Image (cartoon, rainbow, N blue to C red):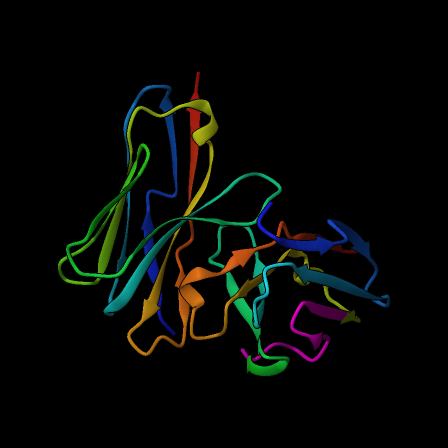
């Protein structure tokens, strides 16, 4: 099946720093999604991207749908301690039949 | 609070036990999903129900048996599990199965099989 390569696997940063993470696929996706999972909770959708080249923001978060439709990026600006968690990318195939998830990026923010 | 609740939140069971996980959604959705989440691995889709009918079973062992009595409730019956089945089991719902991009997840049941 489809596989997404998400990097980095983990990040340790200082409060106030900016963060970037990305996902790449060998196949084309129609939709890219970014989720955050807090400890002890399920993933929560942060941003959804539907068009190649699309750049969408949600507060301090900005995500982009790659031009090739095979990658996506998530940036977090001016990180704060509550940004701690696992961030997942997910891609929806062109057929719309399967949502494929990345392995996640564990973010730790030191105050 | 996403509108999707799961019980129990934690479960420890022996390999010979029978237990059930419950999921309930209060969003008026018609599609419900079971996922398995293991450490350092992507979420694995197990089952999909759309309007109470099972539409996907991703080669899940028969020791996992889903049940969807109505669009708001989803169960996962567990029987003679193996230690490698220990994981976080997540339930999700969406308007219908064509709207997979807008799934709402429950908090999960943390399962430990001894």
Residue A51 in percent (x, y) is at 20, 61
Q: Specify the quadrant of the image occupied by residue A8.
A: top left
Q: Residue at x 65, y 73 (%)?
A: B71
Q: Specify the quadrant of the image occupied by residue B72.
A: bottom right
From the viewer's side, name the closer residue of A49 and A39. A49
Farthest right residue in view = B17
Left or right: residue A6 versus residue A28 is right
Q: What segment is highlighted magenta in the picture?
A: B57-77
Q: Within the magenta stretch, is there residue B5? A: no
Q: Is residue A36 above or below residue B62?
A: above
From the viewer's side, name the closer residue of B17 and A16. A16
Farthest top residue in view = A111
From the viewer's side, name the closer residue of A74 and B86. A74
Q: Residue at x 40, y 77 (%)?
A: A97
Left or right: residue B60 versus residue A91 is right
Residue B53 in percent (x, y) is at 61, 83
Q: Residue at x 55, y 83 (%)?
A: B55
Q: Is residue A97 above or below residue A23?
A: below
Magenta span main SS: strand
Q: Residue at x 51, y 49 (%)?
A: A43
């Amino acid at each position: 099946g489809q596989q997404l390569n998400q990097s980095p696997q983990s990040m340790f940063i200082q409060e106030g720093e900016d963060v970037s993470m990305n996902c790449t696929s060998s196949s084309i996706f129609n939709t890219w999604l970014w989720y955050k999972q807090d400890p002890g909770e399920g993933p929560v959708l942060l941003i959804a991207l539907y068009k190649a080249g699309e750049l969408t923001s949600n507060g301090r978060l900005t995500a982009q749908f790659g031009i090739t439709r095979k990658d996506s990026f998530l940036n977090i600006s001016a990180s704060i301690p509550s940004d701690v968690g696992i961030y997942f990318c997910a891609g929806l195939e062109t057929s719309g039949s399967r949502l494929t998830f990345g392995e996640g990026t564990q973010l730790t923010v030191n105050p | 609070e996403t509108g999707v609740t799961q019980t129990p939140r934690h479960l420890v069971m022996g390999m010979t036990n029978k237990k059930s996980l419950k999921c309930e959604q209060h969003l008026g959705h018609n599609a419900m999903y079971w996922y398995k989440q293991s450490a350092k691995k992507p979420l694995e889709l197990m089952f999909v129900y759309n309007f109470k009918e099972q539409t996907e079973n991703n080669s899940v062992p028969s020791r996992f048996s889903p049940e969807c009595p109505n669009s708001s409730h989803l169960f996962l019956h567990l029987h003679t599990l193996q230690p490698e089945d220990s994981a976080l089991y997540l339930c999700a719902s969406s308007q219908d199965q064509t709207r997979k991009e807008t799934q709402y997840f429950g908090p999960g049941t943390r399962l430990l099989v001894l």
